Amino acid sequence: MNVLLLGSGGREHALAWKIAASPLLTKLYAAPGNPGIGAEAELVKLDVTDHAAVAAFCREKKIDLVVVGPEGPLVAGIADDLRAENIRVFGPSKAAARLEGSKGFTKDLCARYNIPTAAYGRFGDVASAKAYVEKTGAPIVIKADGLAAGKGVTVAMTLEEARAALDACFEGSFGAAGAEVVIEEFMTGEEASFFCLCDGTTALPFGTAQDHKRVGDGDTGPNTGGMGAYSPAPVMTPEMVERTMREIIEPTMRGMAELGAPFAGILFAGLMISDKGPKLIEYNTRFGDPECQVLMMRLKDDLLVLLNAAVDGQLAHTSIRWRDEAALTVVMAARGYPGTPEKGSVIRGVEDAAGEGVQIFHAGTAINGGALVANGGRVLNVTATGATVGEAQARAYAALDRIDWPDGFCRRDIGWQAVAREKAS
């Protein structure tokens, strides 16, 4: 099979690495890719926002499957435009991608189909939003309705923080994404990431993970796109997985089908787990980043076979196998992230850091004058497996410490909840 992978981050490097291992693969192309992806695929200069150009490339190269990594192209309708050209694509339609593209849409779906989630309000102006906050009180959660690269969510512990977050949204800090806001009750519990491979009718559980959104150790500082993750998530017991499927995923699949937008692709549910069960925080309509990196390390089966089954509506006849090991990834970020990252600093030692049970996935990297340099906020994902989360953690940090990048930083406590559980048991 000839496959085109769209995207350029750590998620896409992990997908490229796993797809490249498939015996079904003839040729893998990636657009725009990054230096790490370039080791697995032929990089092509293709504007992924130009859907006609992507379709033309697919016809020219006889592409059998397009795999869409990031959310932006999905929300913009690239899957619809490619399917209209009879090109097979893994990823949801524009209508189905509203589950990620509009938090308000998802909250309304939850209300309509009795899917457990936080109480909420939707607002299109700052005055009514602030009035709701004053009435409800803090702590409270402020979310830009649209796509904001993982940075449009503020967990406001005080009314002052909530007001500032609303001002940021309506004054344009997140562009069009903040033109409308969703305000939610503050939920307590333990967060988990739950994935399902979907074909429009069937949803097949596709692993669990737990990520670390805040930039600093001890879960402090502002939210980011994710500073690390591990899999599996111990809080997602078999009972909790069953409840999540029954109470959240299955009614979502039914609801989307009834709305004329059946969901096919990866459905990523961000969950809050408490003694009362699972509640939906939000949906993403693609593999998580950095959760994808740990899932790919643990996936035993051929990813390309599974993606084809989803595209062809064959998931009812498919099963997924996982390795027994845990996996953990640590994000190395550029100084300044999650604000404006400093670009151009030289990174050395990446090849020496990889080894048995360790993969280094590139995210925001580039080649400049023959040297590997930082070219984004989240730059590298140091990913390792181990018999336990603690072993994977130790192996990942040992590999990370072999990388020579003075201008990079990371959290030193990725996986702390699972490690604490392991030590207590």
Image (cartoon, grey):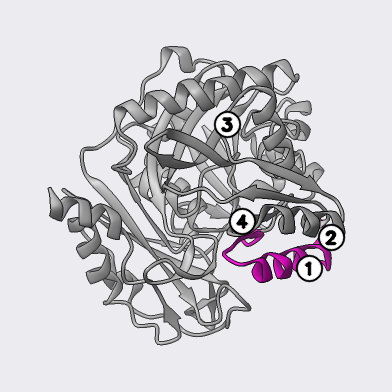
Q: Earlier in the sequence, mark 2 or mark 1?
A: 2
- Tell me the distance, in whole angstroms, between the alpha carbons under discs 1 and 3: 35 Å
Q: Earlier in the sequence, mark 3 or mark 2?
A: 2
* Residue 265, numbered label: 3
- Tell me the distance, in whole angstroms, between the alpha carbons under discs 3 and 4: 32 Å
Determine contact: label 2, label 1, CB under 8 Å: yes
Q: Nearer the viewer, residue 202 or 111?
A: 111
Q: Nearer the viewer, residue 330 or 277?
A: 277
Magenta residues, as a range? 149-176
Residue at numbered disc 1: 167
- Tell me the distance, in whole angstroms, between the alpha carbons under discs 4 and 2: 16 Å
Looking at the rendered image, the disc whose residue lies closer to the viewer, 3 or 2, is 2
Q: Residue at x 78, y 43 (%)?
A: 51
Q: Earlier in the sequence, mark 1 or mark 3?
A: 1
Looking at the rendered image, the disc whose residue lies closer to the viewer, 1 or 4, is 4
Residue at numbered disc 2: 126
Q: Amino acid at mark 1?
A: Asp
**Local crowd at mark 2 within 10 Å, few (<14), some, or many (≥20)?**
some
Query: Which quadrant holds residue 157?
Result: bottom right
Residue 417, compared with residue 74, is above or below; it is below
